[in-house]
Image: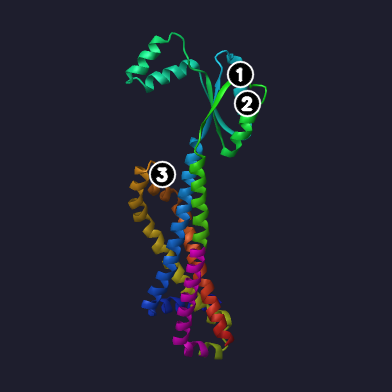
Amino acid sequence: MDASFHRAIKAGLKNFVRNGWLSIATTSVIGLTLFITSILLGLLFVSSYVLGEIQDKISVSVYFKTNASQEKIDEVKKDLEIMPEVKKVEYTSRDDALMMLREKYQNNEVIVESLREIRENPLEASLSILVYDPSKYESIENKLIAGKYKDLISKMDYSDHRGEIERLNKIIKSIKKVGFLIILTLVAVSVLVTFNSIRLTMYTYRAEVEIMRLVGASNWFVRLPFITEGILYGLFAALLVSVCWYPLASYLAPFFVSSGLQLDLVELLNQNFIYVLGIEISGGVLMGAVSSFIAIRRYLRA
């Protein structure tokens, strides 16, 4: 059994080498499918990353009246922190707010002079609230404005990026829809090309196949060389695409930096290369093996 298996694998390797340009063409088509699929998945990842970055910048600041005691403010902060939808709550005292205002406008003589003229600190203490889901801000607002703390609160100020989030969500949905159709089409083309390549190989070596069948070779022994050939198409295509990722990541990295995204593509690829390679190889081998199996099955039934 082992000897037969090795002979069948060896025959598949010979078929792959002998076919020359046909092998290169089939490998290229599968590689193109894997490459475009990877690009689309990469776009989805980057879009999701940007969406997360924008969501992290969304916050609501709750300002307290100047007569609100520190004890009451701490109570509000604790109540917010135990809410499951709240990610983080940061407190800014009146003195800290004044210091930050002075630092921000230290070169603005009008504001600096105005602050000097005002003897009493006009600023209010505040809490900056971050949540996991921006849609939850409404429930937090209702709790604060209409709840037991309504007499303590002066106003609520949103750092609102909801328009950006909605646009980005639409882009992500469009990439998913269009990407799915493109991937489906390319996979179908790849399977068809590989199918025809295997059929052509089988036609070329039809005499050998007939001899194997006449001498009693099992169907699996007849199939295995051609399935091996299909797997090699997918394997080499996956390796080729995986190698192309590094120069592509190096080329695109400066664009991400210049756009303000703290995303190191090369480092990210280094950390996840094994996973990327595994997915590429799995996809390529699956396409090649399935196409080959369908082709030889139809031939054996003929």
- Label 3, residues with CA under 10 Å away: few <14, some 14-19, many ≥20: some
Give, as a three-letter code, the residue at label 3: Leu
In the image, residue 201 above or below residue 258: below
Task: Give the residue at the far right of this rendering.
Answer: 148
Does residue 133 sit above or below 16 in this rendering?
A: above
Q: Residue 203: within the magenta?
A: yes
The label on residue 152 is: 1
Q: In the image, which is nearer the foreground, mark 2 or mark 3?
A: 2
Instruction: Considering the whole magenta stretch, tell me its main secondary structure.
Output: helix
Can residue 58 be seen from the camera position used here?
A: yes
Which residue has dot 2 on it? 145
Instruction: Please report whichever mark, 1 or 2, sits nearer to the chain's N-terminal start.
Output: 2
Q: Nearer the viewer, residue 251 or 282?
A: 251
Residue position for label 3: 263
- The magenta-colored residue range is 181-210
Q: Is residue 79 magenta?
A: no
Label 2: which secondary element = helix
Asked which quadrant contains residue 83, the reply is top right
- How far apart marks 3 and 1 lie (CA) works out to 41 Å
The x, y position of residue 90, in whole percent, is: 53, 25
Give the vertical position of 252 relative to 27 (above or below). above
Residue at 37% in and 59% down: 244
| Left or right of 246, for residue 75 | right
Residue at 36%, 77% in the rendered image: 21
